[in-house]
Amino acid sequence: MSGGRALVTGGAGFIGSHVAELLLADGYAVTVFDNLSSGRQENIPPAATFVHGDVTTDAASGVVREGRFDVIAHLAAQIDVRRSVTDPVADATINVLGTLRLVEAVRASGAKTRVIFASTGGALYGDFATPPNAETVPKDPESPYGIAKLSAEYYLTYEARLHGVDTVALRYANVYGPRQDPHGEAGVVAIFCGRVLDGRPVTIFGDGQQTRDYVFVKDVARANVAAARATLPPPGRLDARAFNIGTGIETSVTALAAALGAATGRPVPAAHAPARPGEQLRSSVTIGKAASVLGWTPCTGLAEGLAETYSWFAGRRAPGTGR
Ligand SMILES: NC(=O)c1ccc[n+]([C@@H]2O[C@H](COP(=O)([O-])OP(=O)(O)OC[C@H]3O[C@@H](n4cnc5c(N)ncnc54)[C@H](O)[C@@H]3O)[C@@H](O)[C@H]2O)c1
């Protein structure tokens, strides 16, 4: 048990609720801060203190100032890449300014707080570099969402270098698992599970050969706890305190559908639709740096993770079941 005080912004959401649970299990007193815009109250672990509020307001700064947390896992965000395209200002307001306000509040508090930022591997590197992408490849975000995450990382780097704020960025690949909302950055597993449960075909766009790096949500929560404890390199350039959190394995959409069928023992028929313009073709990240510095490696294989995810979605549909 490590103890300490932790704040999880976005802790009512998919990944944040798993992070909050694991920090509690690790002995932290956990406060969840969330505006419930996409998160759900029932996701918040009962042992956590819940504060309803928005990271773009003074309410968040107040919680940070008064809480004097050892760790802040900052996951609250606008996560819809398509929405970032239609409304980049709203996206930047939450994902850039919300993050900056939070880190500024940490700086002003003078507390020794480690800020762990939920960044993205999937949306940062773009299609120019050949995967798997190391942290140091030139960044080429293709959406306002990716641009906002990269901008926020630059602010974290600045706050660390100039003001000594203890910041770290975890660049998640495509996260999947229980409690995922099917409308997010990587909702394909959640969508496929829903389709299989409905007895409907899954939709595969284009030739189905586009790849992603699927990492199980409980492994991502473990990465946050590892980052909370790790001895980190001194602040330096943008990538010095950034870590890819994925598997290093590329899985095509067609292979994902087959893996889901094998993991669940259910047929996964596919309907084909035209390729979506602008869709990234390949994505995966290297994870050697997280292994060597954070001591983190993923431990849930795709088959196991898909089986657990499918069971969760199936259980949710059973009458009388809760979370
Ligand atoms: N899901 C993925 O594959 C993935 C990949 C890369 C990065 N990420 C990042 O991980 C984090 C968590 O994503 P998720 O998939 O769990 O999404 P999610 O939508 O389930 O969680 C986001 C949470 O933040 C809350 N929130 C949103 N705006 C807020 C605001 N202004 N103030 C306070 N709370 C607010 C929501 O209510 C929700 O509970 C995000 O920062 C996201 O960008 C996710």
Image: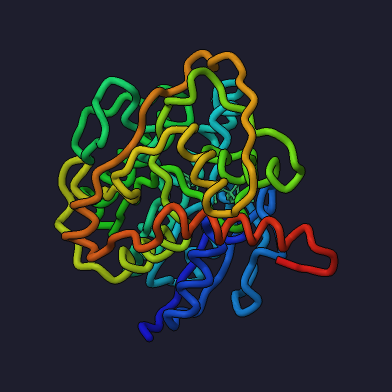
Q: Is residue 55 rendered to the left or right of residue 288?
A: right
Assign the C terminus to one quadrant of the image: bottom right
Specify the quadrant of the image occupied by residue 228.
Answer: bottom left
Q: Which residue is pictured at 47% across the width and 72% down the height?
A: 22
Q: Is 114 displayed left or right of 87 in the figure?
A: left
The quadrant of the image that shows the N terminus is bottom left
Left or right placement of residue 242 versus residue 196 in this view? left
**Residue 104 visible in the current orientation:** no
x and y, in percent, of residue 286 in the image: 24, 44
Residue lying at 65% horizontally and 76% vertically, measured from the top left: 46
**Residue at the far bottom in the pictured view:** 1
Is residue 186 among the parts visible in the rendering? yes
In front: 125, or 298? 298
Quadrant in which residue 43 is drawn = bottom right
Point 42% across, 31% down: residue: 146
Above or below residue 40? Residue 48 is: below
